[in-house]
Every structure is written in C-alpha cells, then in structure tokens.
Image: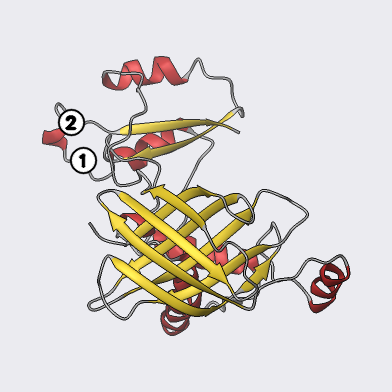
C-alpha cells in the first residue's frame, strides 16, 4: 500500500476536527500537504507542506513549518494572530508528524512546538475516488428513451455532466492521473501551463484574475490537459454529446456511459 492519494479523517487530541492529507508519489519519495480543519470555527486551521526522504510506508517528519489559515483557506494576518494571542490562543510554529500505512488505513500522530496534540491520532481510510461509482443509475435504453426521460425534467433546475465511462465517479482528470497535491498543481503545474499557453496563443492570461485562470484551465482541459475542474452544462443533450464523443459507432450496442444530474 502506498502513502499517495488523498486521505480524510476525523482527529482528536488537544483539539478536534477533520484532517485532509494530499500526497503525490515521486520516483524516490512522497510529497504533499496536510491541513487540520478545526471543529471550532473561531479557531484557525493549520497547514503544512512536507517531503519524505524515502518511499517507506512509515515516515517520521520533524520541524515542519506550520501556516495558519482561516476557514476560507486564507493565511491569517499578523493582526489576527496578535488578537488571538491577546485571548490566550497561541499557535505553533512547527510540528512533528508520524505517518504509517497499515493495509488500507493511514495512521497519523503529531506533536507541535507548543506541546499541543501530543497524543492525538487519526486513522483515515483512503478516499474511494479510484473505485467504481456506487451510485445506482436510472437505466435508459436508446436515444428515444433518453429524450423521453430528459424532456420531462424541469428546465433550469438541474445541471448535467456526461462521462464516457459509466463506472467513473465524479472525479477530475487531475485526480484520475493519480495526483492529489493541489498545492503543487497551483505552484508548479499551473505556472508551466501559463508559460506554454503564452507561446501558443495570442491571448494574454492574467494569473491574478480568477476569470482568466478559469478560462486557461478550461481551454487546457478541452485539449486533454488534466485539470482539477469538472465541466457541467444546463443541457442534458450537451452532456450526452460529451458522454458519447469517444464511443465508436460499432460500440453503441454494448458501451455504457453515464450522465449525472445535479440540483443547481
């Protein structure tokens, strides 16, 4: 069993909350991020980046710098940190973390530079993103059957997504490649994509503009580049086009696709 992937767990100890660990696999090591989302919305959350020295399934990571973020993922300002200190809320500068995979479970223990969470632990079952979807579908046979079904759906109430494989979960192309570390994607992959796009297109994408970032990722995705985006449409017919676009005519009698319907 590998450390790579996304792991989610409830944790307990000095505080309680939800831990999310995203780990990518390299030739001779793992690297990723871990976030502790505190159950108390008045308290900040903790974020660390780490890199292992080997590919062992048991890792002891020491003196990892801790960044403190709000519930939207923004770094706390110095003023906010000082206000917390006035209220006797002190934040650790570093943390030691032990990771160990046993079967399909990742065990995590940590202790901080201010002594918090010394005996806290979390056991996290790896996310099920790579497994077949367990959603029970409504089976529709033939194009006429599909039209009869979707023509009864209330307009502008649902959005739709077509997928060429009926076993896939709702999972981005980025995650289907085996990647999990979104921070690495933002700080390494996206800048590389921006450089390449600048050489291939006459349009300037401003990386500080969220609309420009989304437009570039959308363009890249439709040319086969893995992104952490999921496309949705108001039209079930557009969703059907994308579900069947890679299906050959001689496969239509046995190939199964899936169209998701989500309340908007």
On screen, 152 above or below 245? above
Name the residue located 31 percent from the left edge and 18 percent from the top edge: 140
Q: Secondary structure at mark 1?
A: loop
**Between residues 223 and 261, which one lies in front from this camera angle?**
261
Q: Residues within 10 Å of mark 1 (few under 14, many from 20)?
A: some
**Between residues 257 and 62, which one lies in front from this camera angle?**
62
Percent x, y of residue 144: 32, 17
Q: Assess whether mark 2 and mark 1 are in contact (beta carbons under 8 angstroms).
A: yes
> Which residue is the site of mark 2?
252
Percent x, y of residue 197: 44, 78
On screen, 131 above or below 192? above
User: In this orientation, does residue 109 appear?
Assistant: yes
Q: Which mark is residue 155?
A: none
Percent x, y of residue 86: 88, 70
On screen, 28 above or below 73? below
User: From the image, which quarter does the N terminus lie in?
Assistant: bottom left
Q: Earlier in the sequence, mark 1 or mark 2?
A: 1
Name the residue located 54 percent from the left edge and 71 percent from the top edge: 48
Name the residue located 39 percent from the left edge and 20 percent from the top edge: 147
Say which quarter of the image contains residue 244.
top left
Q: Residues within 10 Å of mark 2 (few under 14, many from 20)?
A: few
**Between residues 200 and 17, which one lies in front from this camera angle?**
17
Say which quarter of the image contains residue 28.
bottom left
Give the number of callouts.
2
Percent x, y of residue 141: 27, 18
Q: Secondary structure at mark 2?
A: loop
Q: CA distance from mark 1 to mark 2?
A: 7 Å
Q: Which mark is residue 247?
A: 1
Q: Would residue 256 appear left or right of 81 to someone viewing this image?
A: left
Q: Would residue 260 appear left or right of 262 to someone viewing this image?
A: left
């Amino acid at each position: 069993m590998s450390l790579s992937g996304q792991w989610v767990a409830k944790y307990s100890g000095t505080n309680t909350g939800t831990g999310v660990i995203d780990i990518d696999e390299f030739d001779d090591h793992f690297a990723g991020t871990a976030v502790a989302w505190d159950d108390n919305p008045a308290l900040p959350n903790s974020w660390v980046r780490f890199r292992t020295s080997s590919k062992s399934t048991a890792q002891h990571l020491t003196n990892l710098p801790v960044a403190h973020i709000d519930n939207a993922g923004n770094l706390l300002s110095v003023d906010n940190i000082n206000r917390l200190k006035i209220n006797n809320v002190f934040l650790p500068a570093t943390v030691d973390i032990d990771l160990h995979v046993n079967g399909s479970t990742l065990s995590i223990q940590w202790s901080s530079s201010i002594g918090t969470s010394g005996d806290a632990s979390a056991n996290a079952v790896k996310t099920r993103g790579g497994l077949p979807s367990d959603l029970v579908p409504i089976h529709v046979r033939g194009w006429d059957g599909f039209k009869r079904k979707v023509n009864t759906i209330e307009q502008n109430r649902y959005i739709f997504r077509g997928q060429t494989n009926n076993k896939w979960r709702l999972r981005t192309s980025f995650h289907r490649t085996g990647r999990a570390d979104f921070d690495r994607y933002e700080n390494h992959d996206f800048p590389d994509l921006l450089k390449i796009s600048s050489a291939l297109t006459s349009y300037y994408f401003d990386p500080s503009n969220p609309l420009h970032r989304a437009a570039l990722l959308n363009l890249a995705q439709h040319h086969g580049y893995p992104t952490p985006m999921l496309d949705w449409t108001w039209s079930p017919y557009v969703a059907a086009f994308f579900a069947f676009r890679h299906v050959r005519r001689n496969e239509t009698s046995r190939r199964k696709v899936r169209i998701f319907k989500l309340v908007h």
